Structures are given as C-alpha cells and as structure tokens.
Image (cartoon, grey):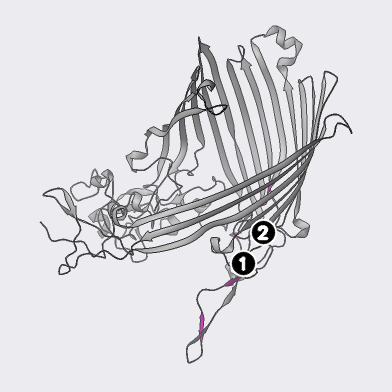
Amino acid sequence: MPTPSTRRTSLPTINASLATQGYTRNRRTDFNVLMGFTEKLDDITRGLSLIGRVAYASVEQNTLTLFRGFPPTYHYDPRDLSYHLNTGVSSGGYTYGTYRTLGNTDLDNQRTNIQIYLNYDRMFGADHHVSSLLLWNQESYRVDEDATGIFPISGQAPQKYRGYSLKLGYDYKQKYLIDFNGALNGSDRFQADKRNGFFPAVGVGWNVSREDFFSKRLPSVNLLKLRATYGVVGSDVAPGNQYLYNQVYIQGANPYSFGQTNQTAGVISEGALGNYNVTWEKAKKWDAGLDLNLFNDKISLSADYFHEYRYDQLVTPGNTPLILGIGVSPSNVGITVNRGWEETITYQDKIGAVQYSIGLVWSYAKNKILYMAEAAPRFPWLAKTGHSINQPQGYKFAGFYSAADVADTKVAKPVGGIAIQPGDLKYKDLNGDGIIDQNDITNIGKPNLPNTTIGMPIKVRYKGFDASVLFQGAFGYSLGLTGTAIEPFKGQFQPLHELRWTPATAASAEFPRLTSNPSTINSPGSYNSDFWVINAHYIRLKTVELSYILPRKWLPLKINNGRIYLSAYNLLTWSNVSKKYQSDPEAGQQFCR
C-alpha cells in the first residue's frame, strides 16, 4: 500500500465533508394572523359594502451548526477499492478535531398590513354593470438588526408604506368592458417631496362572441374576447440602503493606530453620498391579448403580447469620476425594455366516466438595457448597455496552450505573474496588445434566466381518483459553474476530468490540464470564460401526483372530506447540461461554489 498522503493541508473531498464535518439544523417559526369584517351598506345604496382586513405575519429562524475546524481527506487503497483515514502521527496523518457548535438567529421580522376598502357592485337593468373600489392600505415591516448583521449608527427603523387606490369598471351586456385604476402610493424610503407616486392604468375589452352577428354565424365559437391594457406601475425597492437620501456613516471594524505607544481607537468613516432626488422606479406596461373557447369549451386558448418600458430605475452611476473621492448613491437614471409572448392552450373532454385534460403553456421574453450610466468603455465589446440584464461577461476560449505557444513571446498571455504551462486554457486577445487582461473581457453566453419556458399539464379523473402530471422545459439561457461543481481537487473528480489535456491527448482534449492551484487561468472563478458556459436547455417530468378522495361514508366523527395522495418531483430530466456538469439544470445562477 502506498505511503498515506493525507495531511491537514490537503483539500477535503465531498465524501469527507459529508462523513465527518457535522451538520446544520434550521428551525423556523411562521406566525400568521388574519382578521376582517364586512359591513353591507345597502341602506345607503344597493351594492355598497365596507370591508376591513388586518394581517400580521412574523418569521423567526434559528440555526444550530455542529462542525469541525477542518474536514479530513482519505487515502485510497486500489487493492481492495477502499478509503482509509490516516491517523498515524509519525507519518504526519490527520487527527479528528473536536466538534464545536455555533448558534445564530438568521431571520427575525414582523409585518403588519391594514386594509379598508369601500366596494360598490351593482347592475342597472339587465345590460349595465358598474363596479368600483376605494382602498386605503398601510403596511409596516420591521427587521431585527442582530439577525441581519446590520448595525447602522442611527438604528434600524421599520419600513412604512401607505397607499390609496381607486378602481372604476363598467361593462355593457358583458360585450364592451372598460376599467380604470389609479393608485397614489407613499413610501418612507424617499424624502417628503419625493415620497408619493401616482400610477394610473386603463383596460378595455370586447367580447366579440356576444355580438349577434358573430354567434349566429359561428356557433362553435363559445368565446372570443379581445382585450388591451396600458398603465404605469412603481417600485420603492431601494438597493443596499433603506434611506438613500440620507448620508451614511459606517462604524469601522479596523481600529486606527496613533502615537508612539501604538494606541488604537475606533473609527467612523463616511459612506456613499446621500441622494435627495431618489424616488420611485417606474414602468409603462402595455398588453394586448385574446381569449378563445371552441366546441363547447373543449378547446381554450389565451394569448398575450406584452411590452414593458422601465425607467427611473435605481442604478449606481458608473460614469462618476473617481476623482470625487467618495461613493455615490443610486440614482433614477436606468432604462430597460422587456417584451414577449405568453400563450396557454388546453383541450379537455371525457370518455365515459373518465375526464381528462391536456394543456400547453408557452412564454418568451427578451429584455435589453437601454441606459445604465456606465462609464464609457475603452473598447466597444466591454459595454453592457444594449445587452440583456445580467448578461455574463468573460474571456473567449481559443484552444489550449501548446509547448510552442508557451515559448512564443508573440502569443498573448495573462499578466500578473501567472505562469502558463502547456495544457492551460488559451483566450483571445481582443484588443491585440499581446496580453490577456480585463480589456479582453466581452459578453459571453446568455443570462441565467431562460427566455423561453414551456409547460405541459396533464390531468385524468375517474370517480374519486385523480392523476396529474406536469412536464416543464426551459430554453435560451446559459449555465456556468465554479468551485466544487467543476474544478478538480475542490470536489469529487468527474467524467469530464478524464478528458483532460496531456501531451498524449493534446489533439482531442476537452478539459485543461489538472491543477490544484485555484488562481490559474484554468479556474473559472479567476478567469471566467465561454469555455465554462453552456447554452443550456432541459425538459423534465416536474411533478406527478396521484390522489383519491375518500367517500364521505368512510369518514368518522362528522369529518366532511378526506383525501390521500402521493406526489413526486423531478423524476426524469432530459438536458444537455450533463455534457459538462454533473449538476441540476436549474442550478443557482451563474456560479456554484
């Protein structure tokens, strides 16, 4: 058996962490209370009512962690295909550390919401329907400071919101419909003269199938409705700081040293400048669609085209000169556009006592950054404006360095003391200056959010038995992972690592040479590139549920209903992700460490 090689300086494998590292336990308590009243006011006018709601919700989550300071790795014995922990002191082996515990409160927040609305709904004759709603809404949300780790000098105040909404609706014989909505909302995240925002919207609809000329000529069409909406909506989400109009001062963790005796004192530093003009983010939304039902509602179709123009978005300006010497708060200057389609089609019927339905849900969306106040890029390929939100950036893969490339001074190589070896990833020198640096970074792949999604729900019912299946698919997104997900010696070796570069496999290699150095050009964490990015897609059997509704005569103690069911998730997956990653195709965002 070879000499054991496990040391405290060795990196832990996944099986070592699972077997010896300990555990983390989370305990979460959700408390929700909802109270309300409804008072009919027909004595004043028929169809008038007053409704009130009070909701309280709190969340508290505690974490207990049992862990060792450093997990071991194991020595592999090829004679009996076993792993052994080397604990021999004379050979410098590993000794299990003492378990330690750590407790923390991760979440602690409370939310209170009060709503009072005056509702009016009334028919005038047989043809005219009028509806209206007047709403007053107030909300308070408090987050415990210790739970978030936030320690502002002035303390953490509750977040306050108040809004007034008005809705007016009218339809004539359910053929011609119109709705108007207006909301006046106020948020304490903005200073007094920027606090309130007015957001109107209007919607119209025409139920063509209610027309006499249509229903007589096309009796197989049960519903044909054309509709359109246009409105302005707002968001008071303030990134990074609840009150962006306030000047921030930060209590520093590193003390300041002064005097010959090396005395220290705590420090308070000036944070980003406050922005007195910060206000609501806004979006102009336009939607046009149709609803269609055919053959006694056996076939139903709903289709929508939407266009969203977002402006006054809060972004941190990148075009502020650094000579200013201090950070700046986000400003309402960002502009993006998002547009796409959403369609749903369903077919339902029955054969004898068996009822069934099958549907198809499809959506496509494409967004673009029109303005984000970014600094003028040195080269056009560095720009983010004009591309999708969260567009990945990195280097362009150009093969592997050969021994001749390493010796050739004319072949571009990275700066910063990175020693290039044969088998390392080679990237394109976009600006032709002979070095690989940040000026050679460009847009690669697509954002991690799919631009196309599909779903196929299938349902079958026979008497008290129900079965439902959902197929789900996603297309038009990129996936790129780092760390234990792909990098050798940070986790388990993977099939792709067998296709690594060696002098013998240089012509057919699909992976760079193996190295345990996490800072080389072969690390996606240090040098992200399109070599690590997959234009991903998947279709999976998302859910399966079987259920049976118990007959009422089987139920004791005056129980009204009962149901037993069996459910399963992600049973089958078809994806191209497995060509590079042994990971779920829905893996989180762009990096997985």
Horizontal side of 356 relative to 499 (left or right) equals: right
The answer to which quarter of the image holds residue 292 is top right
* 447, 572: nearer the viewer: 572
Horizontal side of 247 relative to 468 (left or right) equals: right
* 30, 357: nearer the viewer: 30
Residue depicted at 46% across the width and 57% down the height: 63
Q: Which residues are magenta?
A: 234-259
> Which numbered dot is residue 442?
none
Helix, strand or loop under label 2: loop
Q: Is residue 543 visible?
A: no
Label 2 – label 1 distance at C-alpha: 22 Å
Quadrant location, the N terminus: bottom left
Horizontal side of 263 relative to 411 (left or right) equals: right
* 10, 103: nearer the viewer: 103
Residue 404 is a magenta residue: no
Q: How crowded is the residue under tag 1: few (<14 C-alpha within 10 Å), some, or many (20+)?
A: some
Mark with earlier residue (2, 1): 2
Where is residue 185 drawn, in percent x and y?
Answer: 75, 49
Residue type marked 2: Pro
Q: Is residue 492 visible?
A: yes
Residue type marked 1: Ala
Residue placed under numbered mark 1 in the picture: 272
Horizontal side of 358 relative to 218 (left or right) equals: left
Residue depicted at 62% across the width and 17% down the height: 293
Residue placed under numbered mark 2 in the picture: 158
